[in-house]
Image: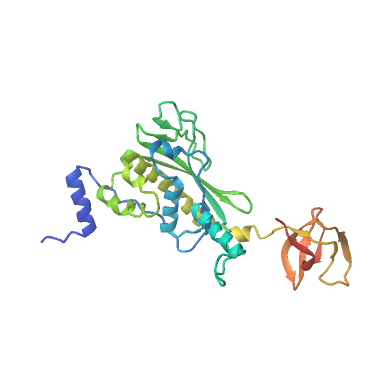
Amino acid sequence: MRHPVRPAAAVLFCFSAISGVKAENPPPQIPTCEKKIGTLAVQEPQNPWWTAMNLDSPAALIKVFVAQSKCFTLVDRGKGLQAAQAERALAASGEERVGSNIGKGQMKAADYVLVPDIANRNGNSGGTNIGGALGGFLPHGFGALVGGISLKSKTADVVLTLTDVRSTEQVALEQGHAKKTDLGWGGGGGAFFGGFAAGGASSYANTEIGQVVTMAYLDAYTKMVTELKTSAPDAKADNVQQSVTMAKPGKMYSSADLHSAVVRDLDQGMTLYPTGDKMGIWWKVTDELGNGGWVVSTQFQLAR
């Protein structure tokens, strides 16, 4: 009795038969999350290494990963932001219709910035090895010398760095590695690369070195998501204390009462640090010398 062949398996079998590639491995999978980790902006690295290989910016590639993984809410800090700023400029000049509802205080803040880069940038004159011979050691126990992207051997070593916007703390730094032989999933890769064109990263699907680089970044992104699921960072909660400055002279009291003892006088411009405790308009704060007490919040403003 013959058993029906599932469509996906049939496609994979046909590709293998035509190309001669033995496709034993399943196609790659982008990791997914049940809930958002935070809001993310993806930023290009300073050195545009991708132009030497006629590839799109790796930021476009990572945005595809992020969008499909549902692990972060993406905010655009590139061309989308430029277009938004142009619209805001039109609104501020009075050119847009009444009720357009565009103005200050609407832009969503990024909790994290993610930078995709190669392991190092010491390129040689021949252009066959992007990264060169210097290499470097990475944290998290990798302990291996890495060498960027090799066009000759079709290998890629990349790095993803995730930074907390508020504290500037490096929340994650992950290495990803891939080689040509990792592309052994045959026709199953068609569906994986299918969404890259819409995301502005089609060049990573159209060339072999582009696919290798993609697999390296996917390796790093998978490690990063796995680590973040375990550590469960919360950018807003982890950085709840935001400093304030006195907008005018005032006093710090021992309790939330104007009749309580005065801890100290506060000069205009003095920096204070809220503890998170509040009673109406009263905020509990500490100063730079460690003194603690209560201040009327109408007397200060958020430090910028």
Can residue 76 be seen from the camera position used here? no
The C terminus, quarter of image: bottom right
In the image shown, does 243 or 181 lie closer to the viewer?
Answer: 243
Outermost residue, top side: 125
In this picture, residue 247 sits left or right of residue 31: right
Q: Is residue 94 left or right of residue 226?
A: right
- Residue placed at 56% from the left, 72% from the top? 99
In this view, the residue farthest toward the left is 1
What coloring was used for the rendering? rainbow
**Is 209 situated above or below 251?**
above
Given residues 81 and 167, the one toward you in this image is 81
Which quadrant of the figure has residue 253? bottom right
State which quarter of the image contains the N terminus: bottom left
Find residue 127 and report its image quarter. top left
x then y, percent, for residue 239: 64, 57
Which residue is pictured at 72% across the width and 57% down the height?
303
Residue in the image at 33% along x and 53% along y: 192
Q: Residue at x 55, y 70 (%)?
A: 97
Q: Where residue 80 sits in the image (x, y, percent)?
A: 49, 56
Q: Position of residue 198 (x, y in %)?
A: 37, 55
Return the residue nearer the eye: 178 or 24. 178
What is the x, y in percent for residue 72?
A: 49, 58
In the displayed orientation, state which residue is furthest to the front: 95
Whether residue 212 is visible to the viewer of this picture, yes or no, is yes
Q: How many marks?
A: 0
Seen in the image, is 233 located left or right of residue 26? right
